[in-house]
Image (cartoon, helix red, strand yellow):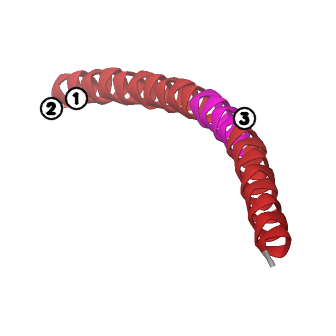
Amino acid sequence: MASDVSSMLRNQVAERASAKEKASILQAELDTRTRRLETKKNELQSLLEKELDRRSNDWSLKLEKYQIEQHTLRERARELE
């Protein structure tokens, strides 16, 4: 009987050690995936910010162009009066 109990306890200890090792491996995999996702997120965020800046600059240039054109047309309209 004592031998059976001892054997059961050894098996439980071995199972716990195995479970801890598996949990450690899974945690390492999760950490690696998390780092990869963070890196990808940062890359995408940087690309989106650059694209937003580019589009903002494009619209600013278009606005400036139309404001100059508007000013020119108003001057011509005054000359025609």
Mark 1 or 3, nearer chain start = 3
Q: Along the horizontal axis of the image, is 3 left or right of 12? A: right
Left or right: residue 50 versus residue 30 is left
Q: Secondary structure at mark 3?
A: helix
- Between disc 2 and disc 1, the foreground one is 1
Label 1: how many residues lie within 10 Å, few (<14), some (14-19) or many (20+)? few
Instruction: Examine the image and state in which quarter residue 76 appears.
Output: top left
* Badge nearest the viewer, 2 or 3: 3
How far from the left and from the top, in percent, is residue 14? 81, 55
Quadrant in which the N terminus appears: bottom right
Q: Secondary structure at mark 1?
A: helix
Label 1 belongs to which residue?
74
Which one is nearer the viewer's eye here, 30 or 64?
A: 30
Residue indicated by mark 3: 32
User: How far apart in space, not on screen, are marks 2 and 3 (Cα)?
Assistant: 73 Å
| 5 inside magenta stretch | no
Q: Amino acid at mark 3?
A: Thr
Q: Which quarter of the picture shows residue 78?
A: top left
**Amino acid on which the number 1 mark rests in the picture:** Arg
| 36 sits left or right of 53 in the view | right
